[in-house]
Image: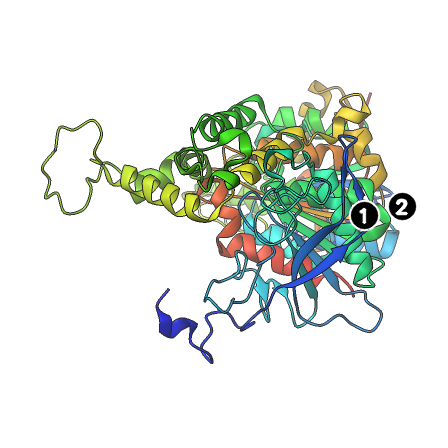
Amino acid sequence: MPAWLAAPGFFMSPLGLITPQQMHFSEPLPLKSGAVLAGYTLTYETYGTLNADKSNAVLVCHALNASHHVAGQHADGSLGWWDNLVGPGKPLDTNRFFVIGVNNPGSCFGSTGPMHVNPATGRVYGADFPVVTVEDWVDAQVRLVSALGIEQLAAVLGGSLGGMQALDWALRHPHRLRHCVAVATAPNLSAQNIAFNEVARRAIVTDPDFHGGHFYAHGVVPKRGLRVARMIGHITYLSDDAMEAKFGRELKSGVDGQLGYTTQDIEFQIESYLRHQGDKFSEYFDANTYLLITRALDYFDPAREHGGSLSKAFAAARDKNFLLVSFTTDWRFSPARSREIVKALVDNRIQASYAEIAAPHGHDAFLLDDPRYHGVMRNYFAGITT
Amino acid sequence: MSDRADWEVIASLVPQGSRVLDLGCGTGELLAYLQATKGCTGYGIEIDDANVQACVQRGVNVIQLNLEEGLALFDDRSFDVVLQLDTLQHLRNTEHMLRETARVGRIGIVAFPNFAHWPNRVAVALGRMPVTKVLPYQWYDTPNIRVGTLADFEVLARTCGLQVTDRFGLQGGQVVRRWPNLMASVAVFRFEKT
């Protein structure tokens, strides 16, 4: 971002400058695995104003590589990852709603994670950070919401892995929310999805700089593994058509149509793009966090505790309201997976709407501003009473 | 079926407090009316993006789905009433959808343009396809991929093993029970699975 955009007084987001906040929780968090997360800190942001009866709060849950920085602009100029959706006059209108973004424990953007010191050992957690699940994150989020004095959220919203968290709120803490908005999500990961995650994890774990997850002490970062992990992820977030439209067989810029007949140098534009994305990612993302978050994705499966019946799992959310959205070209979290959730909602006669948007962009569509998608979101949030 | 008077007649066929599935619910007008005046609950099915947005705006539950794919989302007899209003003539697989309607609902209500309405007969007798209020399209740009008559539906219902519990015509918001196949532009059927 050019410096002038980040200069004071000039903001790309109508929310303007947003400063993250932190809250410490000294009470240990019991985890699904049976382990316990000792005292921990959550980093979060809020937008808009909490009304007098605290009935207008909306929690936004983040996905794999995002954070509490949902909207607005940081001092370094970085724009929130869902700034096109959240803000004054936006589909999730901060003139009406008090919106909370929170970084999950185990992540690497400020909340307690593997790069922090384990109070039990005095050493950096590294690979010893306990395995966290979607349910554990939601439990941590519940505590933050309580600490902010909010008894019941107007809505919980999330896309992809964030959508799983939104669903879990409705299933395990139904009295703490009125609406659940889950975009481009799934009731669990398919074998193919777990397979992609496993390839990414192996890329990281087999990087000689990983050192069994304790690379911090060695002063290195398993960047090679992180790069490959990100490249794989990126391929799965785009549709075949979107990638074709954006890159096709275009050659790397500046080669003037000449093939280099090389096996290791970049020849095609798509290679250049993926390497660039991988490089960028390896500069800021934590390797242990990547392992933890992909594992949380793998483990999410609310039907498992109900004899494999998703309908039985959703019985707990009977008096809630749902909006589900999927995108036709999303092959990582396909519409068929969202329809499984819709079926469970219908089986329980739950108030629900489902939009299946014919967007060309693949999984990434949930972060873009397709007018049909944002139109449904806008209308849904407009109908939520506060 | 766009006239308020028409769908007030349809609404009168829906029992108080019914669970309703509205196939091809459009902007959700009828479902909203049934919710407000008869305490009904349920879902609309709609394929069009703008209509889905309109339903959400109205506070009507809507599921975006292509009806040609069937109603696999819904269990047998999971609704009191399944509505199929002004939808049948757009579907490729009319017979399958009719069977699905009867499977999912206790009561099915179907309404569609009656091609045997006398002005249509006159138009065809004079050698031209009719263009009317209920069939407002030219033959070459109509979204109706099929046309049928009240009498035709009677036969199809029998083939599908449906018991017709009521049938009448609608003309200008009025129920037509005398010679409906001739005198009404819209055919309405209420049926149950035998």
Residue sitting at x 72%, y 59%: A23
> Which amino acid type is marked by label 2?
Gly
Indicate the secondary structure of the residue bearing disc 1: loop
Instruction: Assess disc 1: are there few (<14), some (14-19) or many (≥20) residues with their C-alpha within 10 Å of its C-alpha.
Output: many
Could you say where residue A86 lies in the image, as x and y percent from the top left?
59, 62
Chain designation of label 1? A
Image quadrant where residue B78 sits: top right
Instruction: For residue A255, say whether it is visible.
Output: yes
Foreground label between 1 and 2: 1
Q: Nearer the viewer, residue B61 or A199?
A: A199
Q: Which residue is mark 2?
A: B17
Indicate the secondary structure of the residue bearing disc 2: loop
Q: Which residue is mark 1?
A: A320
Picture mark count: 2
Chain designation of label 2? B
> Which amino acid type is marked by label 1?
Lys
Image quadrant where residue B172 sits: bottom right
Residue sitting at x 36%, y 44%: A279
Q: Is residue A229 left or right of residue B184?
A: left
